[in-house]
Amino acid sequence: MNGKAPATLSDLEGMMIKSILNNPYLTLLIRIILGLVFIISSIEKIIDPESFAVSITNYRIFPIFAVNFVAIIVPWVELITGLFVLFGFVIKESSFIVNIMLIIFIILIASAFIRGLDIECGCFGTLDGQKVGLQKIIENVVLLILGLKLFYQKNHKLLLKGTVDENS
Amino acid sequence: MRRKYRTMKAINFKNIAIIIIVSSALGFIYNAIRKDSIPLLRVQKGIEFIDEIPIDEISTGAALDLQLKGIKLETAYRLFLSENATFIDARDQWDFAEAHIRGAINIPEFSFDPNDSNINDLDKQASYIIYCSGDDCDTSKRLAEELMKLNFENILIYVGGFLEWQSAGYPIGFGGNDD
């Protein structure tokens, strides 16, 4: 279109969708959702690391000796990045870590699902007690889409500190 | 391509490293100071199958033993027929009520209370076979460890669990703890 006035209705719709998607308040909403999900899911795991360690063991991917390391570290990375995403602190880097974690979660859940393991997700600690399955994969993919949107977003509202604006 | 380059440039990998290192440090510090901390390296008791040992010679020995004693379907069924051992269902009360190995008692692992009088009233010298849903579940192993801490002497784990028992067509019971 190159700056020309929208010729058709579908052009207009396209522009509207684009402006909604680029709306900084939408990004703010995404930050709140993603941040809260990560914070809430981390707290239960921090309270009860043993249960989380058992959940990880059940995936039968990590060697047993390494399981507690994961159970000690991951919830805190979730909590810190969740807080950073929520408050918009180093948003580019925190959303990057969030996306990497979500990709790993999706791979783990999918691998358990494909292997037919009948295990609890451990996604929210023992809070939801949901089994791994398609629903969990879809939930994580939706979160990943939100996370990617956040990662590629240029204009943010209410940031504590964003390296995006400083560096670009 | 240019856009990708810009995106990569905008990420500060030092910040990423700092976030991860600080989070990990917080995790380790919190784990070190909390009361119910978990060990840094996980040691899981393995299961040693003792199906070859004659039933009357089975003994689980000291609770500090690194191995739990496991049995397979046929041994579990022989013990079931011999009525020399009590089955303990480690799943929750809802799964138990739906269906369980006939005659089993239910001690849900997730709400295990070492001071529960129902548990302490059990004969600690008797033989018990603990199971959960299948060989994926960990609750039978954890319940076994808890009971061994309470000085139960003969704890076996039926690894195949309820699903294997059920598909073998062996006797099952329904309802609460009273059958």
Image: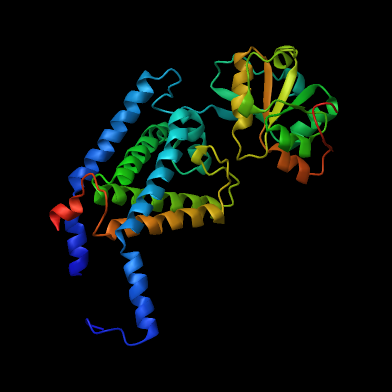
**Residue A155 visible somewhere in the drawing:** yes
Q: Nearer the viewer, residue B26 or A117?
A: B26
Q: Position of residue B97 (x, y in %)?
A: 77, 35
What residue lies at 21% left-to-right and 45% top-to-bottom?
A161
Q: Residue at x 33, y 59 (%)?
A: A149
Q: Quadrant of residue B27?
A: top left
Residue B44 % position (x, y): 51, 28
- Asked whether residue B99 appears in the rendered view, the answer is no
Q: Is residue B145 left or right of residue A125?
A: right
Q: Residue furthest left?
A: A167
Q: Quadrant of the N terminus of chain A?
A: bottom left
Could you tell whether A82 is left or right of B137 in the image?
Answer: left
**x, y percent for residue B39:** 42, 24
Colour treatment of the image: rainbow
> With A141 as the anchor, is B52 left or right in this view?
right
The residue located at (31%, 48%) in the rendering is A97
In the picture, residue A154 is in which quadrant? bottom left
**Across the whole image, how many numbered discs are drawn on residues?**
0
> Residue B26 appears in which quarter of the rendering?
top left
Instruction: Examine the rendered structure and indicate whether residue A149 appears above or below residue B48.
Output: below
